[in-house]
Amino acid sequence: MHDVTVRQEIVDRVLARRGRYHLYDALDPARTAFVVIDMQNMFCEPGAPAEVPASRGICDNINRLAAEMREEGGLVIWVTSASSFANGKSDWESFIRNFVAEEVQQRTIEAMEPGGHGEAIWHELEPDERDLFVRKNRYSALTPGASMLQTVLASHRIRNVLIGGTKTNICCESTARDAMQLDYRVVMVEDCNAALSDDEHRAALENMIQQFGDVMTADEAVAALRKRPNEQ
């Protein structure tokens, strides 16, 4: 887990701009989803082609917040990445050929096989039969055509989206930005996110708190869920 948070100079900037740091004091659990992104073998397993070592350190926090969500009547959604491959082409060919080194392209393709080992939820996490599972094939789960996440959120009348998972600054931030621009109330749960470095993790949090959503710890998110606002 990352031992960094939003820098004081950014906190001061946010306070000067809007007079408060947190956007949301209370969150109605019935209108809230905890969206956990890419916490699968592809990213969590040692030696995996897209390993994020820090991801293994956030499992306890994710499990704790997910359990609280269920207890309070909220929704937990596990989003995983997978891409199909046929006729020599990936369904995200520009990513595979331009952003993955040639020597690990085949390993990456195999790890991203839908329903394969790479897509399986990391064994330290505790999904529940009440949870939902969504597959995506782009960084943001809310890119048009990338997944069914937006449909799922709409069908459950979700307004508040808590984001956890990996990488903080790639798939998590991309999904969070899109969620805000679709008019969801977004919270990045900082100790439920992991990136490849402290600097990348913190930069994503600082982007979020300034323009795209709130940033809370798991404990702060739990407190907001327990307040149960009268109307949202």
Image (tube, rainbow, N blue to C red):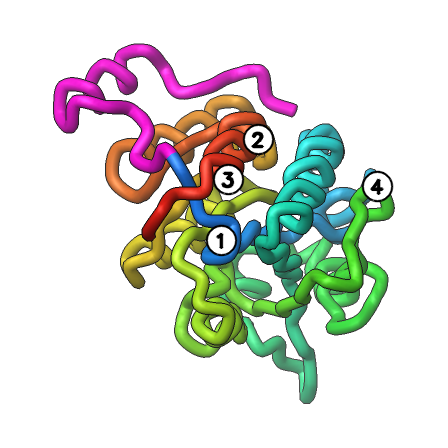
Q: Could you say which quadrant of the image residue 27 lies in?
A: top left
| Residue 184 shown left or right of residue 29 in the figure | left
Residue 93 on image: x %, y %: 55, 72
Precedes in sequence: disc 1 or disc 2: 1
Give the Cα separation between the discs numbered 3 and 2: 11 Å
Precedes in sequence: disc 3 or disc 2: 2
Neighbour tally class for label 1: few under 14, some 14-19, many 20 plus, Cα within 10 Å: many
| Residue bearing mark 4 | 124
Give the Cα separation between the discs numbered 4 and 1: 24 Å
Please say whether residue 50 is visible from this viewpoint: no
| Residue bearing mark 1 | 32
Q: Could you say which quadrant of the image residue 208 lies in?
A: top left
Contact (Cβ within 8 Å) of mark 3 with mark 1: yes
Query: What number of labels is visible?
Result: 4
Neighbour tally class for label 2: few under 14, some 14-19, many 20 plus, Cα within 10 Å: many
Precedes in sequence: disc 4 or disc 1: 1
Neighbour tally class for label 3: few under 14, some 14-19, many 20 plus, Cα within 10 Å: many
| Residue bearing mark 3 | 225
Residue 126 on image: x %, y %: 80, 48
Amino acid, disc 2: Ala
| Residue 57 shown left or right of residue 184 in the figure | right
Q: Say above or below: 19 vs 45.
A: above
| Residue bearing mark 2 | 218
Neighbour tally class for label 4: few under 14, some 14-19, many 20 plus, Cα within 10 Å: some
Which of the two discs, 3 and 2, sits closer to the camera?
A: 3
